[in-house]
Image (cartoon, grey):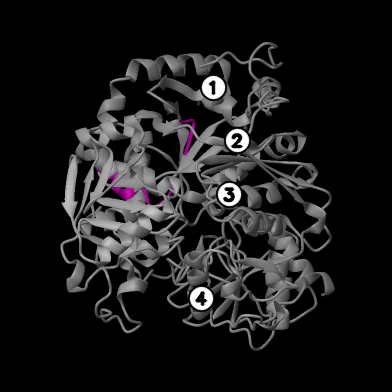
Amino acid sequence: MEKFSRITSIAVPFPRVNVDTDIIIPAKHLKSIKRSGFAAGAFESVRYNADGTLIEDNVFDGPKYKGANILIAGDNFGCGSSREHAPWAINEMGYRCIIAPSFADIFASNCIKNGILTVSLPQEDVDALVMAAEAGHPITVDLEAQTVTCENALYKFDFNPTHKDMLMEGLDEIGQTLRSKAAISDFETKQKMMTPWLYR
Amino acid sequence: MADIKTEATPKTMPKTMYDKIWDFHLVEQRGEGVGLVYIDRHLVHEVTSPQAFDGLRAADREIRRIDSIIAVPDHNVPTKDRDLKNPDEMSVAQLEALEANSREYGLDYIPMNDARQGIVHVIGPEQGFTQPGVTMVCGDSHTSTHGAFGALAFGIGTSEVEHVLATQTLLLKKAKNMRVTVTGELPLGCSAKDVALAIIGNVGTAGGTGHVIEYAGPVIENLTMEGRMTLCNMSIEAGARAGLVAPDDKTFNYLKGRPYAPKAGQWDTAVAFWQSLCSDDGAKFDKEITLNGSDIVPQVTWGTSPEDVVPVTGHVPAPDTFAEPSKQEGAQKALEYMGLTAGQAITDIQVDRVFVGSCTNSRIEDMREAAAVIKGRKKADTVKEALIVPGSGLVKLQAEEEGLDRIFIDAGFEWREPGCSMCLAMNADKAGSGDHVASTSNRNFVGRQGPGARTHLVSPAMAAAAAIAGHFVDVRDF
């Protein structure tokens, strides 16, 4: 997984509330058995006309925000389905950080696994960043310092220390957990005695 | 792992059911509020698992406990013409990958043409795989369904599927405790679906974010297991990753004798353990909501989020009646997408398609509820298609034994094979652009049932009544 420390980039403003993972990537595009190839179908209802042609100047494809690595989103971003195809698609589109008032739990967890930083800030701060993004100002997100800076404004954000380490180190989480193999085995030995019906 | 105690020890802090299940499964504490948590049960389906198996192979890792897994195809299986060649090559690739992975690792695999095949969240309980006090996961957000049995069950992404396969654990942030109490008595004509929608209408789609919801109160106690599953299923639509109902005699009677349930020699010990799981008196909940169940009226959604819900006796709201500008804008967009006008009576909405099915409402009780309304009546001619999709092959067989299939077919409904079907339209079951669908599923998101499709979430009885009338009607007057 790619390490995350600090990025500076222009940002795409997409402050719609309750953006669900069906909007991020509709179910009909989930049929790949690979982890890639999802960017084309991402945000389909926002980016494409009914006839499949690209909507001109939509925020994701228009020239204004080309090359942006930050997405500024609305409250409860990523609600609904647990599909990890949503962060896969977002990653593929080039976004390494999403800033929103709040995120749905499963989506936020899926982002961490894919090296995407989700920053929660109060609504008024997100509103200010949307305006800055629309004006084309670059935004800097520093995970180590847990700050978002833009022009003269500085916003501090909270982030779980365990998750911070994982993002900053770009660790293989399974490899990490397997170091606790002995503890897992001990747990199983005890559990097998107490609730043996859970083992076959 | 804490010791099992069948009685609460004095002096210890009263715990919620969630706290107890968490503590029982904590392998290692990892910093503030994060723990390595043991996972007992894992349901695997074709859409969110192929990349996880590939990951295992790439890293040359084994599956830790194959006895913790059931694999079954459900999301994109066809619901008719199963003996014909499936023209959807991408779906076929996923179905074949699931079968190949299951065979390679020796998993319990239920193939499409097995009578036990069905939606993961229907077959888990049906097989007795879902049990009180277990931790249970699946790469599907509606895993919350299994909380109806007092299981801590939640949806995970594909990286987490791989993590559970390899380690039998997950690194989790502990959620907060929320309790939703539903008092009174549910009126005739209302079911668990109306309770779920009324709760979501009340707390909003982010109301449970960061929390596990425990449902309590007389209305919940009086729900059948099927009803409790419907309710817990939609916890995720209130933002909560998991829902819980305290296990009781209904739970134990449901499980007894099922294939994966504890066998005779272990049954009594298991029940004693299960009875100890309920939240202690005085346990602290971070958030409490109380609803009067006697006031609940059949619910219908009008917008593109499950929180956009009103009683069937109500009207489509005007966007300017919402307090926040972002909600006003959301409502305006929703009305445009749904082709509705502010102030329009819900009963004036014409219905083009009807879908009774999904992990929310495809169990035998749901089939009976729909059949009771449909019996002796005919689908309105203006309704293009009315699908009844049972949640599993066993539900289908049971319904046929009771003659429910004849009631549906005689009334002009289609009686299909089990699967997720038009809930998310990954297979051929799709609504057309602009179609209003009376649907017993769980999400009315933009494009969920097909591009441009307009979903209205309702109970099975309400969906059945809409199919007969051709528009929404109050099933209590029907």
Sequence-first tag of 1 and 2: 1
- Which residue type carries mark 4? Gln
- Which residue type carries mark 3? Ser
Residue B135 to residue B240: above or below: above
SS for tag 2?
Answer: loop
Crowding near the residue tagged with mark 2, few <14, some 14–19, many ≥20 C-alpha atoms within 10 Å: few
What residue did someone put label 4 on?
B332
What residue did someone put label 3 on?
B235
Q: Name the subunit of mark 4.
A: B
Mark 4 and mark 1: Cα distance apart in space: 47 Å
Q: Give the mark toward the camera: 4 or 3.
A: 4
Mark 1 and mark 2: Cα distance apart in space: 21 Å
Residue A78 to residue B130: above or below: below
Q: Give the mark toward the camera: 3 or 1.
A: 3
- Which residue type carries mark 2? Asp
Q: Quadrant of residue B31?
A: top left
Residue A175 to residue B161: above or below: above
- Which residue type carries mark 1? Phe
Sequence-first tag of 4 and 2: 2
